[in-house]
Image: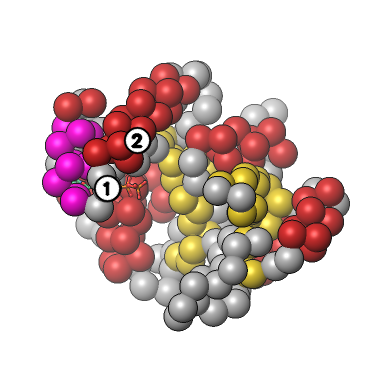
Amino acid sequence: MAPTQPPTDRRPVVISGPSGAGKGTLFNLLFERHPDTFTFSISHTTRKPRQGESHGSHYHFVSRDDFVALKSQGGFVESAEFSGNMYGTSKQTIEEQSAKGKVVVLDIEMEGVKQIKATGFPARFVFVAPPSEEELERRLRGRGTDDEPSILKRLAQAKVELEYAKTPGVHDKIIVNKDIETAYKELEDFVFAPEPAAKA
Ligand SMILES: Nc1ncnc2c1ncn2[C@@H]1O[C@H](COP(=O)(O)OP(=O)(O)OP(=O)(O)O)[C@@H](O)[C@H]1O
C-alpha cells in the first residue's frame, strides 16, 4: 500500500545515475503521487535567465561575483561549471525548503554527489541504474532528445558513473530501473522508510 503519512526521515534525497536511466521518470512519479510532500531544490546559476524563467522559481540567478563569494563562504553543498556558467545548490536553499515542511529532492550528477558527501551534509543517496548498457542506449535513442554525439557522450559517461556506483557505501540505495512500477515502489519504500538509528 502507498504510504499516506509524510516521510519521518526529513533528510534531502539526492538522486543520481546515468543520463537515460530514468531518474526524471521516477521522481516525476514521486511528485505526482505525493503532491505537497516533496520539492525540488532550486539551484543558483550565473547564466542569464531564458525567456519564461523567473528568479527563485527556475533558478536563483546571481552574478559571478556573488556566486564566487557564496562559494568561498562554504555556502554551496555542490557546485560546478558548465559551458562557462556556474551552477550550485546552496545550503540555505535546502534549509529554507526543508523548513517549509517539504522533503527536498536533488537531481545531481556524479561530481556533485562526491562534493555533497565530502561536505558531510546530511542527505540520503539514491542511484538509479539501467538494467543494462544496451537498454540505456535504447532509452536514450527512444527518448529522441539527443543527437548522436550527445548520445555517445552520455553512454561513455554512464560507464564512469556505473563504475563509481560500485564503491561501497557511496549510495544508500541502488535501484535498477527495469520495470518502472517495480523501480518506483523501491524508491517510494526507501524514501518513506524511517531514519536508521544512529550508530553508537
Ligand atoms: N523502466 C523503464 N522502462 C522503459 N523505459 C523507461 C523506463 N524508465 C524510463 N524510461 C524511458 O527512458 C527514457 C529516459 O528516462 P529519463 O528521461 O527519465 O532519464 P533521466 O535519468 O532522467 O535522464 P537525464 O539525466 O538525461 O535527465 C525516457 O524516454 C523514459 O520514458
- The correct choice, above or below, for 97 with respect to 118 in the image is below
Residue type at numbered disc 1: Asp
Q: Is mark 2 within 8 Å of ligand 1?
A: yes
Quadrant position of residue 31: bottom left
Judge whether residue 91 is colored magenta. no
- The correct choice, above or below, for 109 with respect to 153 in the image is below
Residue 102, x across and y down, in percent: 53, 67
Identify the residue at horizontal 24%, vertical 39% (top origin): 148
Q: Is mark 1 within 8 Å of ligand 1?
A: yes
Q: Which residue is mark 2?
A: 154
Residue 133, x across and y down, in percent: 23, 26
**Viewer can see residue 54:** yes
Q: What is the span of residues highlighted in magenta in the rendered image? A: 135-144
Residue type at numbered disc 2: Arg
Identify the residue at horizontal 19%, vertical 51% (top origin): 144
- Decide which of tag 1 and tag 2 comes sooner along the chain: 1
From the viewer's perspective, is 94 left or right of 154? right
From the viewer's perspective, is 132 left or right of 128? left
Q: Are marks 1 and 2 in contact (CB under 8 Å)?
A: yes
* Label 1 packing within 10 angstroms: few (<14), some (14-19), many (20+): few
Quadrant position of residue 162: top left
How has the structure been colored for display? Answer: secondary structure
